[in-house]
Amino acid sequence: MKRVILTFSAAIFLLLAASAVHAQAAQLTLTFTDNSGNETGFEVERCQGAGCTGFANIANLGVNVTTFVNTLLPEGVTFCYRVRAVNTAGPSTYSNTSCATTAVSVPAAPSNLLVK
């Protein structure tokens, strides 16, 4: 059995809407080691909360793709991930589970302060 180790980096980015209103969202970047030489892809599963067990498939990656960016996540929330390789014979066992909490950004400063 080959082992897949997930690592994460958390980042915050801004979305600029047409109305010039800023919405903030977080992202997590998963990386793992491809230990198989015959996969047809990888399945990425996620659940929410530390110690969670209700994983759901959120992405199917291609052959030799070992990075996945999970975007538009809420800030300050813990997500856990696991990955497995797949081919025509079926899926591998799951990788280890790895969890990360999305960063919380500093709020925007107030503006247009007036004193009369």
Image (cartoon, helix red, strand yellow):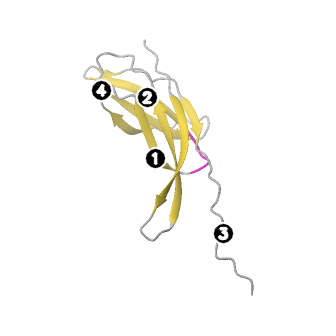
Residue wearing tag 3 = 110
Going by the numbered disc 3, the residue's amino acid type is Pro
> Which dot, 3 or 4, sits closer to the camera?
3
The mark found on residue 63 in the picture is 4
Nearest to N terminus: mark 3 or mark 1: 1
Q: How crowded is mark 2: few (under 14 residues within 10 Å), some or many (20 or more)?
A: many
Q: What residue type is labelled 2?
A: Val
Residue name at image x 39 percent, y 16 percent: 35
Q: Can residue 55 be seen in the rendering of this structure?
A: no
Which SS does the magenta portion mostly show? loop
**Nearer-the-camera pick, 52 or 76:** 76
Mark 3 vs mark 4: which is more N-terminal? 4
Q: Which numbered tag is attached to residue 83?
A: 2
| Mark pair 3, 4: CA separation | 48 Å
Per the image, label 3 sits on a secondary structure element best described as loop
Q: Residue at x 62, y 62 (%)?
A: 108
Marks 1 and 4 sit apart, C-alpha to C-alpha, by 21 Å
Q: Is residue 37 above or below residue 111?
A: above
Give whichever of discs 1 and 4 has the lower sequence position: 4
Which residue is the site of mark 1? 71
Which residues are the magenta region? 75-79
